[in-house]
Amino acid sequence: MPRPDDLLGVLLKQVSRSFYLSLSILPASVREPIGLAYLLARASDTVADTRLIARAERIAHLETLRQAYVGGAADLGAIARACAPVQHQAAERSLLERVEEIVRRADALADGDRSHVRAVLATITAGQLFDLQRFPGEDAAALGALDTPDELDRYTYLVAGCVGEFWTRLHVAHRPRLARWPLDVAVPRGIRFGKALQLTNVLRDIPADLRNGRCYLPARDLAEIGLTPADLVTDAGARTARPLVHRWIGVALQHYEVAWQYTLAIPRAEFRMRLACAWPLLIGLGTLAALAGHGNPVAASTPVKLPRAAVRGLVMRSALTVWSNAALGRDAARLRARIAI
């Protein structure tokens, strides 16, 4: 009997939150490269978020990881020794302690898979470095902001839109039923898929990000309604910003429309891929609906998210309707109807 794969099983489940749901249903041929890429992206994200370590040191550690991720020589043991002991979560400690092992396994992938993994990690870590360098403060007293909508759009590409491209190219390379997928259509749709999910995260996490010195709502947009980023931490400013949040919910919805085109174009026989795409889209739309219905999402005291029972319901229904474009479309339409913007 083969030994269980604890990297792509237990460890990935512990650190991946909702992503493991999609990964677990994927065909085996794409599960390994996608899972390894996720673990390495999660490792670099953990380093970037380790606020007990000075920002300059975190940036240096991220540069070391970037070098290792593209096959260069790097002292990954030093990163583990510096960052693992200060992690509050045991799973994150284990992830950093095993990052060298994960890199070796990614380096052993077939040439095409290895190239795709290295490319997406180069983009993701560029986004993580941008984040650390763009927001120099650690709390609301040193609040920084993105400048323009284009800058926010670029950020969502760097940290998630590129994943949609990676996901698409990997599936087309491995799944014969997708051989006729035109990449010039599928790749841009996959990018919009990733942007939809990341923009949802940005809108959900506004209160927490403000407390950590980060404002992803563009300063130019805020200026148009008479606000500065610092105003968002006041009750009056948070209320005034609500229409702006709804405007960005509308942008996210446009991305979701394209993401659904992507998902419904997947051949029905590729039901695993269809489910792996439908689940995050349904959960994301449900989260947007909850944000749209919240009285003051900029000042929410707890993260706005779907209850676990609602997530289970979406997963169970989609497992029954995965072969039907009409049925999946109705599920999405019901969620969109709850978003009044």
Image: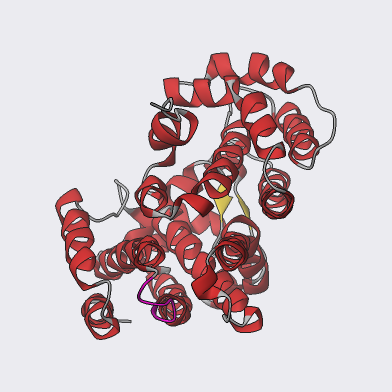
Report the side of 1 relative to 171 (left or right).
left
The quarter of the image holding the C terminus is: bottom left
Is residue 98 shown above or below 332? above
Residue at position x 47%, y 78% from top? Answer: 262
* Camera sees residue 339: no
Dividing the picture into quadrants, the one containing residue 286 is bottom left
The quarter of the image holding the N terminus is: top left
Residue at the far front: name it. Answer: 1
Give the magenta-colored segment's residue range. Answer: 264-269
Is residue 194 shown above or below 130? below
Give 61 or 28, whichever is nearer the viewer.
28
Residue 257 is one of the magenta-drawn residues: no
Give 46 or 324, whichever is nearer the viewer.
324
x then y, percent, for residue 141: 57, 41
Residue at position x 43%, y 45% from top? Answer: 208
* Camera sees residue 172: yes
x then y, percent, for residue 148: 66, 70
Residue 265 is one of the magenta-drawn residues: yes
Is residue 5 shown above or below 174? above
Q: How many marks?
A: 0
Colouring used for the render: secondary structure
x then y, percent, for residue 183: 64, 78
Residue at position x 18%, y 54% from top? Answer: 312
Q: Dominant secondary structure of the magenta stretch? A: loop
x then y, percent, for residue 4: 41, 28
Residue at the far right: name it. Answer: 73
Residue at position x 72%, y 45% from top? Answer: 129
Give 324 or 249, whichever is nearer the viewer.
324
Give 302 or 70, whichever is nearer the viewer.
70
